[in-house]
Amino acid sequence: MTGQETYNAATDFVDRNIAEGHGDRTAFIDPERAMTYAELASSTRRLANALGGLDVRRETRIGILMLDTVDWPVVFWGAIRAGVIPVAFNTLLTAPQYDYMLRDSRAEVLFVSAQLLPAVEPILNDLADLRHVVVSGGQAGAHLSLQDLLAAQDDEFETAATIADEEAFWLYSSGSTGAPKGVRHVHSSLMYTARYYGKGVLGVTADDVVLSAAKLFFAYGLGNAMTFPMSVGATAVLYPGRPTPQSVFENLKTHNPTLFFGVPTLYAAMLADPDCAPENGSNALRLCVSAGEALPQDVGTAWKAKFGVDILDGIGSTEMLHIFLSNSPGALRYGTSGKAFPGYELRLADEDGNDPGDGEIGELLVDGGSAANGYWNKRDKTRSTFEGRWTRTGDKYIRDADGFYHYCGRTDDMFKVSGIWVSPFEVEQALVSHASVLEAAVVAKEDQEGLTKPQAFVVLNDGIDQAGLFDELKDHVKSSIGAWKYPRWIEFVDELPKTATGKIQRFKLRS
Ligand code: 3UK
């Protein structure tokens, strides 16, 4: 693709399946409905017509604040078909955060699940750009009902003649600090990730059934449960509830997916669950994926031992849309993020911008065709993240002689102890490798001399007594990663502060 030709992602992901004879295949299943590709095509044409009826013009924004059901892809692809820009919102936030993002994006219509309406109702009247609220799956009250709106539309629509380089949709990146940033993605990025990661690494085919614990509003879930299966006419299982070990086991058992996508915390919680057994999983599973944060080596090996299926850890970001560095079925090493794969070029940079060489630490930069156009109305942040063809990840890595990348933490979380770099992540990994520990977070803290030392916050497994554990954990860290890296203070806590997407918020722990 040159970037300049006429290309609408909805034609490629939705209509192509029908042109290729997959119209009768099931695209999505949720607890209440299933939807074929032909039905999806029809509903997205109706949605596009509905937007026109509400006087929503091309290149303006609409918001999606919806739980994962078949309505989600209908709204997303319907908007894209019309050349209107859907902005996906995290469903776990609060009214002030929605207020910020709705104002920032100037969304003209908000599509919202009935269950999430209470979270935004207090702010809706005060938003200058918002003209309509459309409710999915329940009582619309004073608002419009998605179901009624779709039923009233014409089934024909001429898909907007957008171009490959044209902005198609936004995702908000929460980051661990600062206001959320609108990340602007173009039409061609979706198929780029499906082609190079979905097909290239995972080998997704029309026979796959996918289940993603990560929701569609998250770039990870958007690829996993929507664009990858749709790129080949496969089926995705959507689940509107919370992904607890219990609900995930249930979905695995009921739908027998071939591909499962989770995050490390969930894999660890599933392994610790009394119901963790192959007969409570999927009998068709061929591969699992982990992303969002680094997968501890122990979790990968324990999962493989239990289910006989590997978990491929890979790193992705909202800015790059999906995974750009990953383990693969043919090249897997637990405890690493894997190797470069076709479609993405990687580079490590030291403080002077030079490649530090194998075995040395540097910031990871990536070049690939799914990089975002930039942040909405945040010029400084755009310029410091998107440097020409390179996107800065803000992550520190060491590349070993075999080409595997070892995660060392965020650039801003690293600190020095006795003049030697310590990655909080490395200390956390050492802590969680102890049988009593479920999760750990490590930050830098100054001791009485004003010197920086590691401090740990530790969540213990159920039923573990903390007596005597402080010394035991210190010794465990010393012997596993180096004497100077052990935590000088350990606080036992019930849970760690996390972002809505499950990343530890270390800044909240720094005192
Ligand atoms: C961290 C990882 C170590 C890393 C994402 C898959 O997580 C995603 O996007 P976000 O914008 O966060 C990006 C940051 O998260 N990270 C993600 N995966 C890993 N760190 N190992 C990993 N495997 O700091 C990165 O910069 O929320 C993940 C696909 C799409 C995504 N957007």
Image (cartoon, helix red, strand yellow):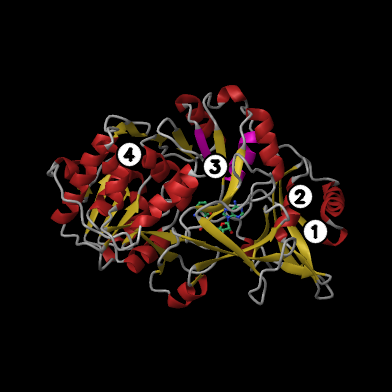
Q: Residues within 10 Å of mark 1 (few under 14, many from 20)?
A: many
User: On screen, 363 above or below 26?
Assistant: below
Report, in whole angstroms, how far the alpha carbon at label 1 lies from the one at label 2.
9 Å
- From the top left corner, tell me how far across and down residue 8 is, in percent: 27, 54
Report, in whole angstroms, how far the alpha carbon at label 2 lies from the one at label 4.
41 Å
Q: Earlier in the sequence, mark 3 or mark 4?
A: 4
Identity of the amino acid at label 3? Answer: Gly
User: Do the residues bearing badges 1 and 4 touch, measured as CB atoms within 8 Å?
Assistant: no
Element at label 4: loop
**Quarter of the render that holds ligand 1:** bottom right
Identity of the amino acid at label 1? Answer: Pro
Q: Which residue is mark 1?
A: 487
Please tell me which residue lies in front, 94 or 311: 311
Element at label 1: loop
Q: Earlier in the sequence, mark 1 or mark 2?
A: 2
- From the top left corner, tell me how far across and down residue 160 is, in percent: 21, 56
User: Do the residues bearing badges 1 and 2 touch, measured as CB atoms within 8 Å?
Assistant: yes
Q: Which residue is mark 2?
A: 431
* Magenta extent: 259-271
| Residue 268 magenta-highlighted | yes
Image quarter (top left, top right, bottom left or bottom right) of the N terminus? bottom left
Q: Which is in the foreground here, disc 1 or disc 3?
A: 3
Q: Which residue is mark 4?
A: 70
